[in-house]
Image (spheres, rainbow, N blue to C red):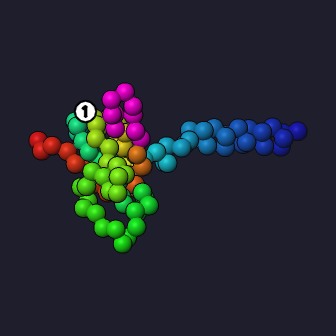
Amino acid sequence: MQAIYRRILFGFALVGVAALTGCSGNTPSADPMLSGRIGDNCTVYFRHDTLGMAAGSPASPTTGNHNGAEVQVTGKLLRVNGGWVCVAVGKAEYTIPKEAILLVEMPSK
């Protein structure tokens, strides 16, 4: 009978340790280059390959549109973490994965 109680106690201890560790190791840390610029206006340019732009159709990295398609978002930088950038444009918010970003343009300070 004591063996059963020990197993139950051991099981609760393992669950408690797992709950304390949680997912904190998976949370991306803030980006040091952009986190100090929260609230500033910015233009986020998308990687051309993520937009399906053909390699035979070159475009400048800072072009506003290509073949009639917008390749940028301009607005206010709201939030940044290790994996995402959030930009407010009017009343809309765009959360953009960093893998899709070519560059972020901001005014000099």
**Quarter where residue 58 is shown:** bottom left
Query: What amino acid is at disc 1?
Result: Gly
For the point 44% across and 61% down, the residue is 52
**Quarter where residue 11 is shown:** top right
Residue 77, percent from left and from top: 29, 37
Q: Is 94 part of what is drawn in magenta?
A: yes
Which quadrant of the figure contains the N terminus? top right
- Residue 101 in sight in this render: no
Which residues lie in the magenta part? 87-95
Say above or below: 39 vs 35. Answer: above
Q: Quick one: 57 or 86, which is closer to the camera?
A: 57
Q: Does 19 sit left or right of 9 as displayed?
A: left
For the point 28% across and 41% down, the residue is 74
The residue identified by callout 1 is 39
Please name the predominant secondary structure of the magenta segment in the image: strand
Residue projecting furthest to the left: 109
Q: Is 35 part of what is drawn in magenta?
A: no
Q: Quick one: 74 or 30, which is closer to the camera?
A: 74
Residue 90, percent from left and from top: 33, 29
Which quadrant of the figure contains the C terminus? top left
Q: Quick one: 6 or 87, which is closer to the camera?
A: 87
Q: What element carries label 1?
A: loop
Residue 21, percent from left and from top: 55, 43
For the point 70% across and 38% down, the residue is 12
